[in-house]
Amino acid sequence: MKQLFLINFMLALFIAPAEAMTVKATATDVLATYGSFSQTAGGTELDATAGEVDPIITSDPATAIYGFGSTSYSVIDLGFGSNTVITGQGADVVVFSLWNGYDYNVGLQAYATDNTLLSSYVYTVDDSSFYDSSTTIVTTAINLFDNSLNSGTSGVALGDDIELGYLRLFLGPDYNGVTGGLSAYSNTSLVGAFHTDAVVVPLPLSAVLFSSGLALLGWIGRRKAA
């Protein structure tokens, strides 16, 4: 079953105009937490200070973190590690959640590497997007919009090639929709990014000198041959 989870995650495709999109990086670095969390809806409160939250946020979308409590929301900051995540055409990030039968909302903010707030909206998680009934995993593809407009998803999408520093997710009862008289606890199991920028690794000095030496020998050889 776990292999099925991972296969569904790694091969999750979201059809966009002119191309299919694939998750290229995952946000599994827990940078900070505020409020309280549980591993199941309405379950036992986790001790974030003791590191009980971090092991749940992994590349396995089968594990999820829920906001805990009845009156306040919980906040978690997630980073992408060594990956350079940027905005691009179409959806920028995707939130993986565990479906519990009811629509609910998740607050999401995107910050630049200098901690500038880029985007801040509430997104609905429902089964109208990609939904695998065999795993109860729902994916919500999100195109990040300019926060300065404060007009929801009717705003202007962020420009391309803007580097994202981290994402802030809001989970909790006051972000939950109520369907059929029942409250749907919001959760997230994983967050992914569609656009990444290759990191250029500089050559060590020894390699530069060696390459320069080869080039010089080649130039001398050509002069002798002439």
Image (cartoon, helix red, strand yellow):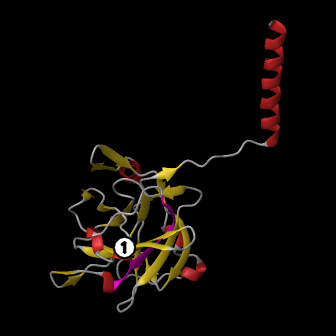
Q: Which residues are magenta?
A: 162-173
Q: Could you say which quadrant of the image residue 75 lies in?
A: bottom left
Horizontal relation, residue 36 to residue 179: left or right? right
Of the pair 56 and 24, the residue shown nearer to us = 24
Q: What residue lies at 34% left-to-right and 75% top-to-bottom?
A: 149
**Which element is circle 1 on?**
strand
Q: Give the residue type at disc 1.
A: Asn
Q: What residue lies at 49% left-to-right and 81% top-to-bottom?
A: 46
Residue reaching furthest bottom?
71
Horizontal relation, residue 201 to residue 160: left or right? right
Q: Is residue 67 above or below residue 114?
A: below
Q: Position of residue 110 (x, y in %)?
A: 45, 70
Q: What residue lies at 27% left-to-right and 49% top-to-bottom?
A: 15
Residue 220 sits inside the magenta stretch: no
Q: Position of residue 225 (x, y in %)?
A: 81, 7
Disc 1 marks which residue? 187
Residue 165 sits inside the magenta stretch: yes
Q: Is residue 33 above or below residue 55?
A: below
Q: Is residue 11 above or below residue 48?
A: above
Horizontal relation, residue 147 to residue 222: left or right? left
Q: Is residue 30 above or below residue 163?
A: below
- Count of marks overlaid on the render: 1
Residue 107 visible in the shown view: no
Q: Position of residue 162 (x, y in %)?
A: 48, 60
Position of the C terminus by quadrant: top right
Majority SS type along the magenta span: strand
Q: Position of residue 105 (x, y in %)?
A: 29, 76
Of the pair 63 and 156, the residue shown nearer to us = 156
Residue reaching furthest top?
225
Residue 166 visible in the shown view: yes
